[in-house]
Amino acid sequence: MTDHPLVIFTPSGKRGRFPVGTPVLTAARQLGVDLDSVCGGRGICSKCQITPGYGEFSKHGVTVASDALSGWNSVEERYKSKRGLIDGRRLGCQAQVMGDVVIDVPPESQVHKQVIRKSATERHIEMDPATRLYFVSVAEPDMHEPTGDFERLALALRDQWQIEDIEADLAIMRRLQPALRKGAWSVTVALHKGNHDMRHRVLDIWPGFHDAPIHGLAIDLGSTTIAAHLCDLGDGRVLASSGLMNPQIRFGEDLMSRVSYAMMNPGGDVEMTRAVREAINALAVSIAAEGGVEAASVYEVVIVCNPVMHHLLLGIDPVELGQAPFALATSGSLSLDARDLDFAALNRAARVYLLPCIAGHVGADAAAVALSEQPDQSDDMVLIVDVGTNAEILLGNKHRVLACSSPTGPAFEGAQISSGQRAAPGAIERVQIDPLTKEPRFKVIGSDLWSTDAGFAEATATTGISGICGSGIIEAVAEMRMAGLVDQGGLIGSPEQTGTWRTTPEGRTHSYVLHDGTAEGGPKIMVTQGDIRAIQLAKSALYAGARLLMDEMGIDKVDRVTLAGAFGAHISPKHAMVLGMIPDAPLDHVTSAGNAAGTGARIALCNVAARSQIEATVHQIHKVETAIEPRFQEHFVNASAIPHAVDPFPELSAIVTLPNVSFNTSGGGADGRRRRRG
Amino acid sequence: MTDHPLVIFTPSGKRGRFPVGTPVLTAARQLGVDLDSVCGGRGICSKCQITPGYGEFSKHGVTVASDALSGWNSVEERYKSKRGLIDGRRLGCQAQVMGDVVIDVPPESQVHKQVIRKSATERHIEMDPATRLYFVSVAEPDMHEPTGDFERLALALRDQWQIEDIEADLAIMRRLQPALRKGAWSVTVALHKGNHDMRHRVLDIWPGFHDAPIHGLAIDLGSTTIAAHLCDLGDGRVLASSGLMNPQIRFGEDLMSRVSYAMMNPGGDVEMTRAVREAINALAVSIAAEGGVEAASVYEVVIVCNPVMHHLLLGIDPVELGQAPFALATSGSLSLDARDLDFAALNRAARVYLLPCIAGHVGADAAAVALSEQPDQSDDMVLIVDVGTNAEILLGNKHRVLACSSPTGPAFEGAQISSGQRAAPGAIERVQIDPLTKEPRFKVIGSDLWSTDAGFAEATATTGISGICGSGIIEAVAEMRMAGLVDQGGLIGSPEQTGTWRTTPEGRTHSYVLHDGTAEGGPKIMVTQGDIRAIQLAKSALYAGARLLMDEMGIDKVDRVTLAGAFGAHISPKHAMVLGMIPDAPLDHVTSAGNAAGTGARIALCNVAARSQIEATVHQIHKVETAIEPRFQEHFVNASAIPHAVDPFPELSAIVTLPNVSFNTSGGGADGRRRRRG
C-alpha cells in the first residue's frame, strides 16, 4: 500500500493517484469522471453508485486487494435496507480509497447517460438537460457577517456544484426562507441553465433532499397536428407520446389561408394565437395524465414548428410571412417563460425553448430535422424529407446543406382525404393489394395483425377501424397503382376496366373500397378519385422541392434519402418511391426516420449543448425559396404522374412492376396542367 | 492644408489627425470625445451641436482658417429654420474637417452632461442612465439572406451604436415589424442596459425618429413617508418631487409593529405588500401629472428603503427580520420588471432597480446615503445621519466605514407629533422663539417670509398653516429649550415658571402655543409635553446609534457631521445640536444634506455605473447591530436630557446659551429610566 494509491475508473479509463481516505466520488470529480450525484456526496441520493473490481487487472497493470476500499458503512447499510442496492455496489461518496483500485461506473450512475432513441436510426441522446435538481447545504445566517439567504444559497451552489451566476424571481425569493428553515439549511433546487447567457435560474425549491422526477415536453407543432413527447428530464425516458389536431384548422387548412385569415380579420391572429396556446395547454394536461405525472412537474418545453405557426404561437401577426420577402419578425432561438405563452397547466416557472428558424418559409421544424438527422455531418449526399402539411426538405453533406419548404397540403397527414384521420389507434397505417385478385389487406395502429389474419377482429374490437392515416393513404395509393387499379395519370379505373367491384362508381369518377364496416356500424373506408388527386398534388410539391434543391446543388442523384413523417408514422420507402414522392435513389438507401422534427425537439430538450449546436448550424444552411422560383413550378407540373414522365425509376423496376395501364386518354396531360393551390 | 488636418476638441483637450472630409462627429467618436447623438449622424436629432473656433489658438499651437470646416449645408439650414440653432453652432454630423480646427463641445451636447443637484452639497450627477433612446436604420429583409427583422435590428445597433447582446420580449416582437415598415426601416428604440449582465433589453420602439423625453422615478420608500423625484432621463432634470404617507401605517407605526402584524395575521404581509404597491402606483400617477408628463413615459424606477419595507414591497414575509439573526431573504441589488411589482401606471416595460441592503437592519436606504454622501471617499472622519422613522447612521472615512440603523420612531418625520404633518406646503418648517418675550415666529413651506413679516398672511393664503413638519418640530423644541421654556429634563414650564401665557396647561402638563389659527378657521398649533417626549426618545435613539459606531471605531470625536432628512426638509445643524441629536462636532462642520437617500436613488437612476459602484461599496461597509448591543441601551438611557448629561457641547456654547432651568426635580432622572418602545 502506498500513501497515494492508484485509482482507475472504467469505462472511461481515467486514472490518478489520491491520498488514502479519499472518497471515490471526490476522486471521480477531480479526474473529470462522469459520476452522478444530486446530494453532493451526503449519502442521500444514491446516484453515485459504483462497482469496485477486485483481483488482478492485467490490462491496467494493477492488482486490487480486498481492502482497497474502506469497509461497508452504516450509511450504505441504511440505504441498502431502505431502498435497496445491487450486491457488489458501493456508494461512491462513502467508499474511500485505501489501496490501488479499479472502479466501474455503471451506466445509470453516469450523468451524461445515453438514452437509446426509439426509432429506425437508433441514435443516442446524451443527457444534459437545461433543468436539473441540485441538493445543497446553505450556511446559516450570521448577524456579524450579514448576507441574504439567497446570496448564501448562491455561494453554496458555487462551492458545492461549481455553478455561478444564480438568479431567482420574486416567487422563489418568497419561498426561500421557509424552505431553508424547514430543511434545516439544506434545500433541493431545480436550476435552469440558459444556453445563451449561461446564467442559472432557480425554477423551484424544496426543503431538504427532494428527488421526485421532473419532466419536459418536446412538441412538434404542425399546421395540422400537434405532437408531443413527455420526457423524464433525469434519464431522458419518453413516458408518453400524444397529439391532437391543431385547432387553427378552423381558420384555414394550410398556412397561407391562415395568414389570409389574419389579414382579412382584424384580431384574427389573436384568435389563432389563443387557439393554439389553449391546445398545447390541453395537450400538456392529457399527456401528463397519460404518463402518470403532474403537469406541474413539467419545467421545460421545447417547441419546433414552421414560421407561420411560430409567429402565431408567439402572438406575432404572420402577415409578413404571406408576401415576399417573407420576413420573419425574429429568426433566432427564443427562451421564454411558459406563462408568457399562457401555458398555465405547466409548472409556473417552466421555461420554453424555441429552436431557431432558418428562413421565412423554413422554420424551427426544419432546424429540428437538421438537429436530428445531421446532414451537415454526413459524408454522402443525403436528402431528408419531413412530410407534413408543409414539407421541410434538406439536401446536403458535410460540405454544404440546402433547405427549402414545400406546401404539400395536409393530405400526407390524412387530412383532406375522404376517410383520412391522424395517426391514432384504429387508423389504417399499412395497406397491401393483391395484384391478381385486387383484394386489400391492412393493418391498423394498435395491432400487429393484418386484417386477413385470424383474431384481427378481436384485436381491433376496442379501437375499431376508423379511417386512414398519412402512411396508410400513401401505401393505399401506391398499392392501387401497382395493382393496376390506377393508371399513370392517377385515374381510378371502372369495375369493367379493373375487373373488381371494389372500384365502384362515385358520381363521375370511381372509388376503391378498402374496407366496408357498415354491417358492424363502422365506416365505409374508401380511396376516392379526389384522394388520389390530393396525394398527387402533395407528392408533386414534395418532389419539386427536392428537385429544386438538387438543381441548386448541381446534382442529378442523391446517395441517401431519409423520409420523416411529422406525426410519428413511418412512411414506407417503397411506396414513397412508387408514388414518386422523392427523386431516384437506391431503394436500400431510403430509410424512414419517424418524426425527425419531434426527435430534434427531444434532443434539444434533453441536451442543452444541442441548442447551441443547432443555433450555429442553421447559420450554415443555405435556404432556397420555392415560392419565387420558376423552376419549382416547372418541376411541380412535371411531377404529377405516377410515376411521372420525366424521371423513370430504374432502381424500382427491380422490385415492383408498374402496369402500363391508362384509363383515360387525357389523364396525364390534364393533371399536368393543374395548378397548385394557394 | 495637409491631407490629415489636426482636430482639437475643447474642453476635453483631446486631439487627433483625420482625413480631409471626416465629419466632426466621426472624429469625436474615434477620439472618445463626449459628443452626444441620438440619430447616429443623420442630421435629425441635433444633439451633436458643436462650436468651431477660428483664428489663432496659441495655447494649442494652431491657427484655424475660416474654411477649416466644410460649408454650411442644406441639412443644417433646414434644421436651423425649423427648430433653431444658435449662431456659430454647427451640426457635428454635417460639418466636415477640411483643415486644422479647434472645436468646442458645449455642455448640452455632452452625453455625460453634469447636472447640478439642488442641495446644500451641490454635488454633480454624471448622466449615464440605464435606459436611453437610440435611432437606428435597419437593413431591409433579403429573401436570399434570410434573417429576422429583430436580428437585423440587433446588427444595426451593433454597427451603428456598438451595442451588443440585444434582447426583447414578445410584446416588442409583436410591434417590431409594423414599426420598421412604418418608419421606412428606421426606428427609435428605448434600450435598457443591465448593470449585472450588460445585456440590453428593448423596452419600447417607435417608427422613425422619436425624441419625446423618457422619464424615471427615484423613490425613497420610508416607513412613514414615500418620497419620489420624477427625472428626465435625457438630461437628469428633476421635473417634480412629491410624496405621500406610507399607507402601511395603519398596520403599525414602526417597522417592528408591522413585522408583528405579519406574524399575528395570516396574509398580513400580503395586505401590506398590496398597500405599499398601490401607494407607489398612485404616487407615480400624481407626480407624473405634477411634472406634466404621462406616467407611461416612466421607464425606470429606483427604489431605496429599509429591509422591512424592502421585503414587504417585494412580497416577502418580513418575519425573519423581526428576530435575531435578522436574516434577509436577499441582500443583493435587484433588477425587476415594474409589472412584477404591479406598478401598472408606468410604462408596461418599465424596469425597477433596488439598491442592495447592507444587513438585516441596515437597508438599501443606507446604501443610498452611502452612494450620495460617499463616506468611503472621505479623508476625514464623517458621521452621516439620515433621519427617518428608522435612522440610518454611517461613520467612517476612506479606510473604514461602519453602519447601523436606529429605531427613532416617526417623530422626526412629524408623525406621532400632536400638530405634526409631513413636509408639504403649509407646514411649519422653521421656528424662532424670542428668549426675552418667548414669542415665536415661523416660516411655512411654500413661502420665504417669516410669520412676523408684512405680507405673510397673503403669501400663505392658499396653503394656510396646517401643522409642523419634521424640521419644524426639531427647531421648535430646540428653540423652546433655548428660550428657557423647557428644562434640561425636557419638561415644559407652567405660565408662572416661564412668564408667558403660551405655555398653557393641558391636563397635567403644559403645551406651548406656536400658532393659534382658530379665529381664521385654522388649527391651533401647539408643542405638547408628549411631543417633547417623542422627540427626546427619537433623539436618544439617534445619538445612541451614533455613539455605538464611534465606540466601534474607537473614537470620541468626529471631524464632520452630515444631517440628512428622509423627506427633503433641511434640518438645522444648530437646532440638532441643541437637542443633542448628534455627538460633538465643530458647528461649522455640521451640514445638512437634504434627502440623502433620495439623492442616492436619483444618482442610481441617472447613472448606471453608480449601481455597480454602490454594489461594490456595500461589501466594504461593516455593519453594527444595535438591537443586540448592550452599549446601545446604555447610550440611549444616558442621552435623554437636552442637552444630555454625558457629553457637554463646548462648541455650541459659543453660539447659544442653554438656560440652567429645571421645572421638576425628578425631570432628567425620570426620563432617563424610560424604556425604548418596541
Image: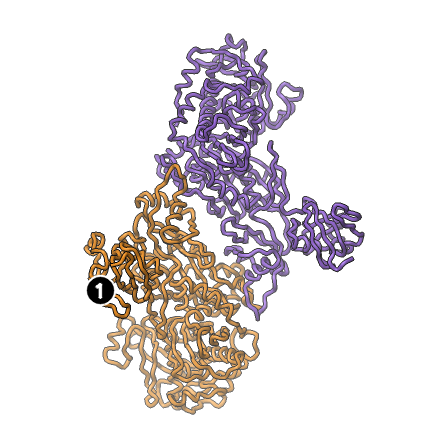
Chain colours: A orange, B purple
In the picture of the structure, the residue carrying the numbered disc 1 is A54
Q: Position of residue B624 (x, y in %)?
A: 42, 33
- Hey, which residue is sitting farthest bottom in the picture? A660
Crowd rating for badge 1 (residues with CA inside 10 Å; few <14, some 14–19, many 20+): some
SS for dot 1: loop
List x then y, in percent, for residue B293: 60, 43
Of residues B294 and B138, the one drawn nearer to the viewer in this rendering: B138
The part of the image, by quadrant, that contains residue A375 is: bottom left
Residue placed furthest toward the top: B496
**Residue A323 visible here:** no
Residue situated in front as seen by the camera: B97 or B256: B97
Above or below for A11 versus B196: below
Q: List x then y, in percent, for residue A583.
A: 46, 82
Residue type pointed to by label 1: Tyr
Q: In this view, does B398 lie to the left or right of B25?
A: left
Query: Quick check: A3 left or right of A229?
Result: left
